[in-house]
Amino acid sequence: AIPREPPKIHRLDESVVNRIAAGEVIQRPVSAIKELVENSLDAGSTSINVVVKDGGLKLIQVSDDGHGIRYEDLPILCERHTTSKLSAFEDLQSIKSMGFRGEALASMTYVGHVTVTTITKGQLHGYRASYRDGVMEHEPKACAAVKGTQIMIENLFYNMIARRKTLQSSADDYPKVVDMLSRFAVHHTSVSFSCRKHGAARADVHSVPVSSRIDAIRSVYGVSVACNLMTIEASDDDPSSSVFQMDGFISNANYFAKKITMTMIRKKLLSYTKELSIRFDMDADRLVDCGALKRAIEIVYAATLPKASKPFIYMSIVLPPEHVDVNIHPTKREVSLLNQEVIIEKIQSAVESKLRNSNEARTFQEQV
Ligand code: ADP
Ligand code: MG
């Protein structure tokens, strides 16, 4: 065979590099909304409202009442690696905010059209600016604004034909968005959240600030979910095995056996909650996935309550910040924990004994 010439290596255009990276950070409309809501939480908001059109492909709009963005920061707001949250690498260890990489807004401008409206405290009017490919398109325009920031993304993935086609041909992201905001609402009890489809009169998530977690669950998922939950706790404080504190709510044996009477919205929501819903909260109250923990709990339910094998779970896990590596995944959805196996085992056995005890109590009651 004739040896082939080695292909020439060249440097990719920065715009190509940025668009590829953006496609990883923003995988689908729901991931863009997650980043925007986390930014609103980082900005100290007490009210966050989301509007979605066409599953987020046409329009995503997130409005908050947080601290806003300074006028002089607007030109670099959507450049890659611009952030107000991190300066030195060491800060990552103790970071309290959910964001830190300054990549989310930039990414959105590489795969969609971004418009930001914001006002800071003490200003008479706000400013509006729009962005493409990391760059502010024109001088910020003065405009009326109430408080905080509104970020709008139009035509997400307009320049990624394959991604857009795949997303258009499957069920849209709206149910995922509703599910995610419900979880945020259950966790951030002092923030009010709403989520609606563009043009809809009614919101599909509508939470008000409440004083306890169970009140939040009741207001988001309905009475029939809240009344079938048991509290759960587990902890360890032995540095040689693991250090954590977990508390939360898990569903009991009646959770699905019971006839469910709810309003339409609640019924719709309930079908989403059939998914096991686990939340981790660490120092920064991050919403992340832990596949291993999820599976461990599913196994316990399948063994003890075979009929209720799709349980409702809310768990808040607090860990020393230095035991968590948040920087292992571009979307920050997965994190790695020190001594994860030990933690999972402890939680698994707490769930198991809770379910067994409640089962025994029930059998005993039925016999009496
Ligand atoms: P990160 O959150 O990692 O810092 P982002 O690209 O998500 O990066 O946001 C860049 C910066 O823009 C943030 O550090 C913050 O200062 C500012 N910002 C973004 N969204 C908001 C918001 N809703 N309210 C106030 N500031 C915001
Ligand atoms: Mg962010």
Image: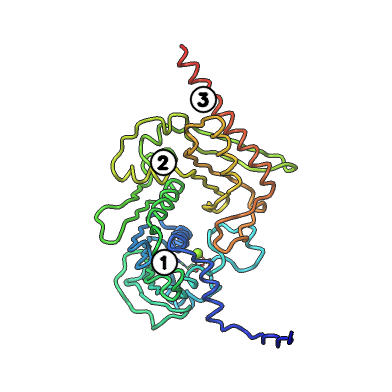
**Which mark sits nearer the N-terminus, 3 or 1?**
1
Measuring from the top left, give residue 114's x and y in whole percent: 40, 73
Residue in the image at 39% along x and 65% along y: 168
Dot 1 or dot 2: first in sequence order is 1
Query: Marks 2 and 3, how far apart in space?
Result: 21 Å
Q: Are marks 3 and 1 in contact (CB under 8 Å)?
A: no
Foreground label between 2 and 3: 3
Question: Pointer 1: residues within 10 angstroms few (<14), some, or many (20+)?
Answer: many
Which residue appears farthest toward the left when viewing the image? 201
In 3D space, how far apart are the residues under numbered discs 3 and 1 (Cα atoms)? 48 Å
The image quarter containing residue 302 is top right
Element carrying mark 3 = helix
Q: Distance of mark 1 from mark 2, alpha carbons?
A: 29 Å
Establish whether ligand 1 lies closer than 8 Å to the Cβ of label 2.
no
Residue 110 image point, x, y percent: 47, 75
**Element type at marker 1?**
loop
Select label 3 or label 1 by which is in front: 3
Confirm or reject: label 1 Cβ below 8 Å from ligand 1: yes
Left or right of residue 210, residue 262 in this image: left
* Residue under pointer 2: 217
Q: Residue at x 60, y 33 (%)?
A: 350
Q: Which residue is mark 1?
A: 68
- Circles 2 and 3, Cβ within 8 Å, touching? The answer is no
- In the displayed image of the protein, which residue is found farthest to the front? 1
Point out residue 70 in the picture as x, y percentages from the top left corner: 44, 72
Q: Position of residue 327 (x, y in %)?
A: 62, 61
Residue identifier under label 3 = 358
Q: Nearer the viewer, residue 139 or 292?
A: 292
Q: Secondary structure at mark 2?
A: helix
What's the amino acid at mark 2? Ile
